[in-house]
Image (cartoon, helix red, strand yellow):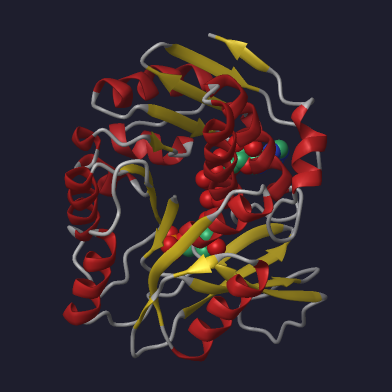
Amino acid sequence: MIYTLTLNPSVDYIVEADEIQLGSLNRTSNETKLPGGKGINVSRVLRSLGVESEATGFIGGLTGRYVEEFLNREGVQTGFVNVEGDTRINVKIKAGSETEINARGPEISSHAIDSLKDQIRKLGKGDYLVLAGSIPSSMPDSIYEEVVQICKDRGAEIIVDAEGDLLKDILCHRPFLIKPNHHELGQFFNREITDPDEAILYGKKLVKAGAKNVIVSLAEKGAVYINEDGSYKATVPQGEVKSSVGAGDSMVAGFLAQFLKTTDTKEAFRYSVASGSATAFSIGLCTPEKVEKLLQEVKILNS
Ligand SMILES: Nc1ncnc2c1ncn2[C@@H]1O[C@H](COP(=O)(O)OP(=O)(O)OP(=O)(O)O)[C@@H](O)[C@H]1O
Ligand SMILES: O=P(O)(O)OC[C@@]1(O)O[C@H](CO)[C@@H](O)[C@@H]1O
């Protein structure tokens, strides 16, 4: 079974406007509310690709109920730990360019953290835990490593999509998959990474440090995949980017969904890129129809 862990879920409030001026009254041309948070997005895409998962993490208040009910209506199983504060609202402004305002998230009590750890202790061999997104500001950064250690002790595989510093302590635990974007990869190695060849070079170092599968996304410049046996480069399909929110999460879900069906890493990588682009070309997340349509446009090259 796949579990996704979103420590800091959100309601994503996506507003579209012709133009936004700071310091003025602005009016929207359209707005959409969706459950958000990286792990939750992975669960939603898995569901639409026909793969069961359970979404876990901390939720609270009216916004938390909105997230949970939305997921259950879609058929995503949930096992959240309830907290007293409200699940955050993240504002995504689409006005020509994309601007995001992500909130801090609620206070998490030590009792809630213990309940979450107890849940994770139930995982075992054959399970996968996707650990993705930021940590609420009231929690210690060490929580990622603690969760990873529990999974390792229980024999469950982990997938981590997190910013550079959080990744550092995790690589030695041999994560099944990590998916930094090229900025995060650059942050990790303290340098700018701008093209796929460089991303492969540095991705190989992550494999050497312990990651079993590495995908580095470079937005419109494509994506690369690296494991112990070699590496691939992928082109991305051409299209109009409507909102890239969740594109990276869709890549994680696309890879997992296809890998678990076939264990073919090349095809899983193709699905990953098609899922990322299908989400980028949508307001909200990809649909299986859009993913299937884009698959033929993703060229995978040995490198
Ligand atoms: N302009 C684009 N054209 C086609 N596909 C795109 C474009 N921008 C993003 N994508 C798709 O989305 C994937 C992820 O994009 P990106 O590298 O921006 O990841 P990310 O920063 O993790 O995403 P997120 O916005 O979810 O944080 C890309 O690999 C690609 O498949
Ligand atoms: O603040 P974090 O946890 O880093 O990111 C949260 C978030 O921006 O990530 C998702 C897209 O990847 C959104 O649904 C959500 O709002």
**Residue under the image location 62 percent in, 24 percent down:** 267
**7 with respect to 217 (left or right):** left
The front one of 235 and 19 is 235
**Does residue 158 appear in the picture of this structure?**
yes
**114 with respect to 246 (left or right):** left
The front one of 216 and 29 is 216
**Vertical side of 300 occupied by 19: above or below:** below
Q: Quadrant of ligand 1?
A: top right
**184 with respect to 52 (left or right):** left
The front one of 136 and 24 is 136
Q: For residue 233, which quarter of the picture? A: top right
Q: For residue 284, which quarter of the picture? A: bottom right
**Vertical side of 25 occupied by 164: above or below:** above
Q: Could you say where residue 168 lies in the image, as x and y percent from the top left?
A: 23, 40
Q: How many marks?
A: 0
**142 with respect to 181 (left or right):** left
Q: Could you say where residue 293 lies in the image, as x and y percent from the top left?
A: 82, 36
Q: Could you say where residue 41 lies in the image, as x and y percent from the top left?
A: 56, 58
**Residue under the image location 25 percent in, 27 percent down:** 210
**Does residue 240 appear in the picture of this structure?**
no
Q: For residue 292, which quarter of the picture? A: top right
**Residue under the image location 40 percent in, 41 percent down:** 184
Q: Could you say where residue 126 lies in the image, as x and y percent from the top left?
A: 36, 41
**Vertical side of 269 occupied by 63: above or below:** below
